[in-house]
Image (cartoon, helix red, strand yellow):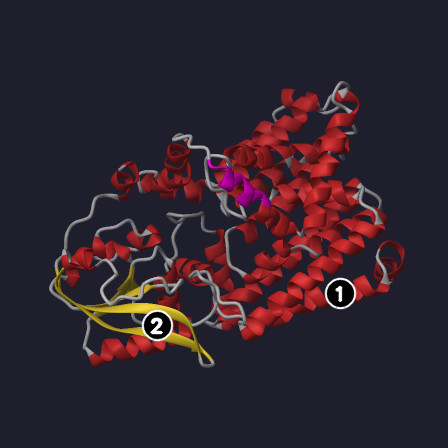
């Protein structure tokens, strides 16, 4: 009760408090009203095919969705509830970390800022590996704090386990041991730990807990490590400067955190570094700790952004300590503004989810997938096709698999790399000679002529290809989704290159 009173009176006013409550309420009701995003469907597809790890990402998100859908059944409510519950636990962990570093009053400011972000909404409502990553990242920092600041040796062991679980969530977790070692190097009071076996034991335990991911990669010719590491570094090595990538990164991060918090983080970090630029050893141990788990990941992706497209979620772990640092310095006026802007953004998002007034020109939408599945099944039945497939990465195939009991194939049907669809043991040679329905999404309604979808590619894998009437999905009287449909007869199976070869091409 005292916590609520302080929020209402001390550091934000009554109106912003109700706005913050409304933001949390919008997240809660969205669990029931929001349809499945392609990411929800794809990572649920992971959970339907249990593995030690997966091609795109480690397995933690799959295990999370498997647990909730096993208990609550195969439905989108169970999936979004899983994300929301784990994100709520992350928020608690962030508060527990903040209260170890700053007085309770400051920690309450920090959690208000954290709760106001669009980042928390994304983690709560869209299944991604970042949801378990941020949970285990926060717990890892708490364990490292207890081990280093409070000299509790057993927490070195716990930190290793939690860092391993973070790596089992997403490869970005490599910045955790990097941050730990950097902090010990820079902290005069704690550098002594580098001469003990404790931090190195922590790293060994992390590797042991990460062994499912390592074993899967060894068994699959390091396909996932190659995809996430060497392939992307090869693309970045082309070193083509693209200023719009930098602008895209900054724009996405401003939206992700809401501008007030993002700007406050940058200002706080710059001020802290400038204040101690010539006397680093005088910086508080807390300040060094926060910077060591913010700067490495933030600067890595910032420096890559001129030559490589950085996705909106890649910097998320940095904002745990970034928000704690900014929140300890920000004043009431700016917190109020942050909450007000966030409320407006979330209210607009609620209107979009309920009424869909702004059409999303992308497959990254929750709209129309169930209707697409029903219409696709009707076409498959009408033409007595043997199987259905799509070729837009994982999105359409993932959504159709979510709504169907029969298996929907990916672009490996056409000899292309199909992410995790390549690693579930399907024998495509068994489809030889069979007929299929090919679904091709046109999210931007760009193609107006009949024969614009890659017919030549289809014809090299099927004896005959006939374009059918496209599927249109309506919101009221307005068409909002368009899918081209092809009847493809006589599948001609062609052995595909191994995934490792495709990555090198």
Crowdedness of circle 1 by 10 Å Cα count: few (<14), some, many (20+)?
many
117 relative to 359 in the view: left or right: right
Residue 80, numbered label:
none
Residue designated by label 2: 404
Measuring from the top left, give residue 354's x and y in whole percent: 57, 74
Q: Quadrant of residue 141?
A: top right
Frontmost residue, 94 versus 259: 259
Q: The magenta stretch spans which residues?
A: 242-250
- Residue 498 highlighted magenta (yes or no): no
1 or 2: tag closer to the N-terminus: 1
Q: Name the residue under label 1.
A: 19
Q: In this view, does 242 lie to the left or right of 254?
A: left
Above or below, comparing residue 314 to residue 147 in the picture: below
Q: Position of residue 29 (x, y in %)?
A: 62, 72
Quarter that holds the C terminus: top left
- Residue 27 visible in the displayed image: no
Task: Name the residue rendered at 49%, 36% in the picture.
Answer: 207
Q: Is residue 245 within the magenta segment?
A: yes
Label 2: element kind: loop
- The alpha-carbon separation of the residues under discs 1 and 2 comes to 40 Å
- Quarter that holds the N terminus: bottom right
Residue 358 vs 421, above or below: the answer is below
Question: Up-down: is 32 above or below 59?
Answer: below
Q: SS for tag 1?
A: helix
Picture residue at 50% right of the left edge, 35% below the top: 306
- On the image, the x and y values in percent for residue 101 come to 78, 40
């Amino acid at each position: 009760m005292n916590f609520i009173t302080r929020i209402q009176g001390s550091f934000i006013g009554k109106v912003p408090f109700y706005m913050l409550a409304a933001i949390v309420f919008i997240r809660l009701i969205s669990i029931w009203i929001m349809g499945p995003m392609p990411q929800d469907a794809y990572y649920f597809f992971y959970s339907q095919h249990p593995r030690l790890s997966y091609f795109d990402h480690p397995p933690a998100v799959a295990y999370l969705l498997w647990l909730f859908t096993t208990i609550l059944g195969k439905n989108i409510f169970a999936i979004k509830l899983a994300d929301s519950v784990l994100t709520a636990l992350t928020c608690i962990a962030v508060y527990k970390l903040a209260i170890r570093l700053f007085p309770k009053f400051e920690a309450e400011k920090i959690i208000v800022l954290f709760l106001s972000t669009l980042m928390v909404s994304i983690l709560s409502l869209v299944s991604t590996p970042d949801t378990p990553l941020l949970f285990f990242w926060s717990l890892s920092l708490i364990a490292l704090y207890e081990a280093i600041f409070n000299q509790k040796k057993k927490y070195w062991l716990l930190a290793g386990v939690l860092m391993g679980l973070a790596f089992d969530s997403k490869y970005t977790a490599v910045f955790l041991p990097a941050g730990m070692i950097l902090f010990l190097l820079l902290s005069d009071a704690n550098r002594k730990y580098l001469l003990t076996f404790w931090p190195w034991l922590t790293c060994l335990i992390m590797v042991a807990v990460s062994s499912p991911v390592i074993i899967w990669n060894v068994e699959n010719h390091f396909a996932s490590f190659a995809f996430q590491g060497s392939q992307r570094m090869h693309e970045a090595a082309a070193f083509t400067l693209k200023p719009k990538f930098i602008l895209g990164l900054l724009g996405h991060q401003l939206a992700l955190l809401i501008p007030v918090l993002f700007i406050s983080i940058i200002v706080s970090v710059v001020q802290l570094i400038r204040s101690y630029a010539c006397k680093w050893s005088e910086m508080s141990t807390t300040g060094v700790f926060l910077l060591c788990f913010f700067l490495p990941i933030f600067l890595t992706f910032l420096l890559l952004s001129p030559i490589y497209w950085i996705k909106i979620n890649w910097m998320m772990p940095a904002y745990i300590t970034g928000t704690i640092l900014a929140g300890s310095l920000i004043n009431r006026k700016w917190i109020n503004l942050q909450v007000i802007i966030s409320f407006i953004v979330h209210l607009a998002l609620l209107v979009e989810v309920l009424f869909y007034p702004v059409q999303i020109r992308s497959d990254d939408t929750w709209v129309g997938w169930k209707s697409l599945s029903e219409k696709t099944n009707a076409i498959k039945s009408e033409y007595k096709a043997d199987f259905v497939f799509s070729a837009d990465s994982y999105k359409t195939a993932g959504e159709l698999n979510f709504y169907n009991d029969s298996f929907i194939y990916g672009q490996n049907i056409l000899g292309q790399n199909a992410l995790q669809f390549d690693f579930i043991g399907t024998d495509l040679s068994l489809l030889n000679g069979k007929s299929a329905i090919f679904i091709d999404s046109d999210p931007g309604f760009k193609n107006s002529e009949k024969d614009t979808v890659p017919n030549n590619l289809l014809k090299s894998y099927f004896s005959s290809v006939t374009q059918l009437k496209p599927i249109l999905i309506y919101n009221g009287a307005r068409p909002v989704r368009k899918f081209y449909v092809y009847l493809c007869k006589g599948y001609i199976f062609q052995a595909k290159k191994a995934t490792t070869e495709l990555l090198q091409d």
